[in-house]
Image: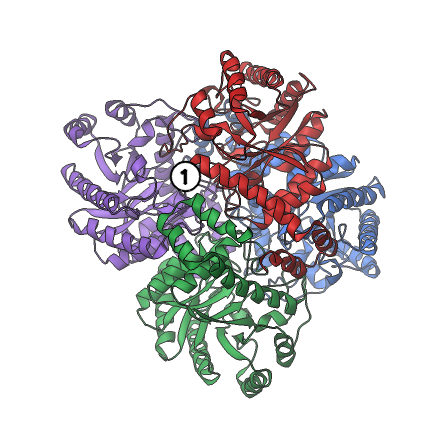
Chain colours: A green, B blue, C purple, D red
Amino acid sequence: MEVRYAIGLWLFGSIRDRFATYHPERDLRGKFEEASRVKGAEGLEVIYPAEFKDEQLDEFKSLLKEHGLKVAGLLVDLFTGPKWINGSLTSRDEKLRREAIALAQRAMDVAKEISCTTVSLWLGQDGYDYVFQADYRKAWDWLVEGVREIAGHRSDIRLALEYKIKEPRAHIFVGTVGKALLIAEEVGLKNVGLTIDFGHALYSFENPAESIVLAHRLGRLFHLHFNDNYRDWDHDLITGSVNLWDLLEVFYWLEKIDYKGWISMDIYPYREDVVKACERSIENLKLAEKLVRRIGIESLDECIRIGDATKTVSTLWKLFL
Amino acid sequence: MEVRYAIGLWLFGSIRDRFATYHPERDLRGKFEEASRVKGAEGLEVIYPAEFKDEQLDEFKSLLKEHGLKVAGLLVDLFTGPKWINGSLTSRDEKLRREAIALAQRAMDVAKEISCTTVSLWLGQDGYDYVFQADYRKAWDWLVEGVREIAGHRSDIRLALEYKIKEPRAHIFVGTVGKALLIAEEVGLKNVGLTIDFGHALYSFENPAESIVLAHRLGRLFHLHFNDNYRDWDHDLITGSVNLWDLLEVFYWLEKIDYKGWISMDIYPYREDVVKACERSIENLKLAEKLVRRIGIESLDECIRIGDATKTVSTLWKLFL
Amino acid sequence: MEVRYAIGLWLFGSIRDRFATYHPERDLRGKFEEASRVKGAEGLEVIYPAEFKDEQLDEFKSLLKEHGLKVAGLLVDLFTGPKWINGSLTSRDEKLRREAIALAQRAMDVAKEISCTTVSLWLGQDGYDYVFQADYRKAWDWLVEGVREIAGHRSDIRLALEYKIKEPRAHIFVGTVGKALLIAEEVGLKNVGLTIDFGHALYSFENPAESIVLAHRLGRLFHLHFNDNYRDWDHDLITGSVNLWDLLEVFYWLEKIDYKGWISMDIYPYREDVVKACERSIENLKLAEKLVRRIGIESLDECIRIGDATKTVSTLWKLFL
Amino acid sequence: MEVRYAIGLWLFGSIRDRFATYHPERDLRGKFEEASRVKGAEGLEVIYPAEFKDEQLDEFKSLLKEHGLKVAGLLVDLFTGPKWINGSLTSRDEKLRREAIALAQRAMDVAKEISCTTVSLWLGQDGYDYVFQADYRKAWDWLVEGVREIAGHRSDIRLALEYKIKEPRAHIFVGTVGKALLIAEEVGLKNVGLTIDFGHALYSFENPAESIVLAHRLGRLFHLHFNDNYRDWDHDLITGSVNLWDLLEVFYWLEKIDYKGWISMDIYPYREDVVKACERSIENLKLAEKLVRRIGIESLDECIRIGDATKTVSTLWKLFL
């Protein structure tokens, strides 16, 4: 396992929800200044073009250089603008579908320019809120065709589908690990894979470790997001603040499958000092890596080989002896 | 049962979530203009002072008159401003707690001035996101004391606690019908009761009809909010778009307990024409009233008396014969 | 659409849960006698060999003849016996895995003998309750290999994977429509598909209609189970007792995709007269078929084409005008 | 805090669910023999009269003596027999309501005889599965009157309401901490309080620590049950196997409120060695007590006083440094 930690640049803007605004808005330079204060973070994940426009590319590059940061991932913005609120790749409007594809392809080109290997596609507005609202047949055809066309644009950049079961739509098409992998397999291109968000997996009642193994098993685990929640909603809490054992199980499997790549913090510290919350989150993940080794990979191998829950729980709780 | 329908004035501002903004912001006059287009709505529910300041009171009154609308309820704004994001009545800061109490008392005075009998207290920021974050003992003492002090300010205005299990906090103190009634009973004042939101009840896995009966049983059913969801989150969908039978059961019980009062639409039509979505919601509720009578109160009495689920389901499905 | 209705034979045995037993046990003849009283049911779904052993095959055939019933589906019993409680196709014990495969293959042969075209595989004990309990890599390999070996046994019988997210295991491997389809696609045989249970789909927060369309899109929709619940658990309630609109949406899509096949009742009427609860369930589904036509396929096509939720809700509620 | 640990005697019978039976049935002596092997357990919780009849009282007493065990609690069986499947205190049948009250009163007398101070009332069959099935008004009146009549039988035994939101009914009346306390307060007797089950609290989306504090605040925290789950269902897993921090928060508050009493294991080790699973569960709780002290009560006091989530999470994770 070779992991590097990154933070979402969007965490340093005005975090808000439908009731209140929790932090001040910042421009690109301001966000970089905050982000660069996060100890342990070597990279950034950025929403393009919401966070920097094409004309800011040079500024963006020099900010990266200035702060010694890499780009862990580019997230295509198909969800913040008013034009996307009824969908992007599955919009009823062919013009919008074309525009979405073109934007994602453009994001791949931009990624190349900033030495980022992974573009994430989170299709949060592509879904439905009501029964009899979506044409599921067309939507799934459009999804598969759209992803194929985007990924086919260039094979040297990986396109990572980030699934999430709901929010902002009541139902999102690319909602679960199974559905995301099904699309990737149907598309059939090697550079199509998944961004697995620990919290998204948890609150669709997946076990994040199993989801990671499933994606890896098909050669499609590209990127990881971390945060935490109560298995009920995407609360985006500080990592390790709710679920400890699931976190350790994830790191055990990252070790087993020898994951080499980035892990991005996608927390939403509405009421916290954002820099400190990010630092704590990274610190906890680094500790989680160590805790797995402290328990012992072989001990855990043995637990899994035998499958005796009591013995397994004893092994985990030895951490506290 | 004597019901009048109202709409939340806030529906006519910029509806947004943490990802996007879905509608244009409007000033007070603009909101009134939109709201007054909703056929079937006789009243407004307003967030004070977020939607009108004290200095706008005269303007507000003349807008009411101009548009022939009543005020169904005043909702005290203890949740939109940055000052409240860590709580109002349960803030660690005594000054803020005092300010929250004073604001709610002031809201009662304002309500009096605009012939509104019910002030709702939705304490959405009073809760916690993490374990070991809240001092539950103090918080519950503050809640009870705060509510007592507010309600004690004047007995001619009813103070209605609106419970909700989560959002924006991961855990909200006043989260369920049981907790809200427990506070009301401990406070012990006659003018403390509940605003029951159909959707809030549903997604905390209550049965809304039962919650309504429970509140009524203690003489504390003051006000109602309607919307709909998938029992998983406060999606605030068009009424009747998801759950039909629960809606009919509510109207059956409103008839049985002879509810006399307002019903406010608290939907969030992110991607819809707001005026039409409100009209549809009111229309559906009026139809639901009729459907209960079409099935027949006595038939339903008999179903409940016997408790045979198959017979009950047959009775309900006779609607379609 | 050409649909015939069936009932699970197991409904006529002793329905129990972990606290109580709700109905008397019955032998094969006794179950047939009850089942044959259900008006509207033309077929049975049977758990093999839990409900009839190989040596009872002749008795079973004559009971079918005697009561004029067909076999809608055979469900392989890999979940009731003590031997399967730690898994069947994913058991750590190779001998058990072989035995499970052989039993399922034998079920396909038996199905052929009783003119049943579909064998359902519900792997309810194949999963895990704790973290660090399952070897996800091996388990998924075993699943795919096992299903391939079973389905490969003969191509004239369809093997239908019935997914369910939990119960009796806290996590079941074949848990969602996405995962089930992923297995089917990886296996790559034409006679591998899905049994979609309306309730299972609902409580894993899928939209049943979408799941049906997804399976059909890949030519893998083989069989359907119906019941109802509150989207929280597999309560197996009378169909149509909770969710109306979702039911209508399903029948709309069954019409659109021209589903030809069986629909089995998989309800658990713990406290009800089982015969009457089954009759009511079938009656409701037949009514649901008609309601979709009453609203009008073209009207609904138009709703979906436009995607305006308010208009859609209006169209649905016209049922009541 | 002075805590003693107990185990449910029912864990040593045939644990089953609606699909399979997982362990062999045992008679009273057999159950005692198993239970007495659990290291760390000083007491038993028993379902009366399901687990011992009045005529077995002497045998029961000598078994207690023989094995050196105390009775931590008596649970009145108003949920296993066929007679109770439609409710006990809220049955439509007045005769059954009277019988339920008499049985619970008898349980109080028996408790006295076996030096047990707490009788738990878990009304799992008192609820409803369908809308329009229950008469909520009558049910709540019956609940309050029934509890009052039972508790009024004698004041030297405490009557502890154990709430649970669902299972076996889809909706249980005494479903949440708020509702249970509301009943206790309305009854108004000092010997009416709560049994709080950690898992029941979790999966009705309560925070168990908050629920404990709420019950204590009203002088009504009588008894505790422990197990664990994924916040979605009463899986009754080994304690500490899923949720660590919530467990520590509970022990912190038990210390703060100086809880003196029993803690019973109410786990369901379907597929595990029951003795070992119980031992592990008790061991984990004893460790949890220590971990709270290791972190430091004052440190945690300070965390709560300040309410800074990042600092709190840091404090918790110091356990691993």
Residue positioned 49% across, 83% down in the render: A114
In the displayed structure image, the side of residue C204 where residue C43 appears, left or right: left
In the displayed structure image, the side of residue B207 where residue C193 appears, left or right: left
Residue closer to the observer: B128 or A275: A275
Amino acid bearing label 1: Glu
Q: Quarter-wise, where is residue D191 in the image?
A: top right
Q: Position of residue D168 (x, y in %)?
A: 48, 32
Residue ID for mark 1: D272
Residue closer to the observer: C227 or A71: A71
In the displayed structure image, the side of residue A38 where residue D96 appears, left or right: left
Instruction: Tell me: residue B125, above or below residue A93.
Output: above
Q: Position of residue D180 (x, y in %)?
A: 64, 32
Residue closer to the observer: D294 or C144: D294
Instruction: Tell me: residue D261, above or below residue C313.
Output: above
Please report, as a chain letter, where disc 1 is located: D
Residue positioned 21% across, 55% down in the render: C190
Crowding at mark 1 (Cα within 10 Å: few <14, some 14-19, many 20+) = some
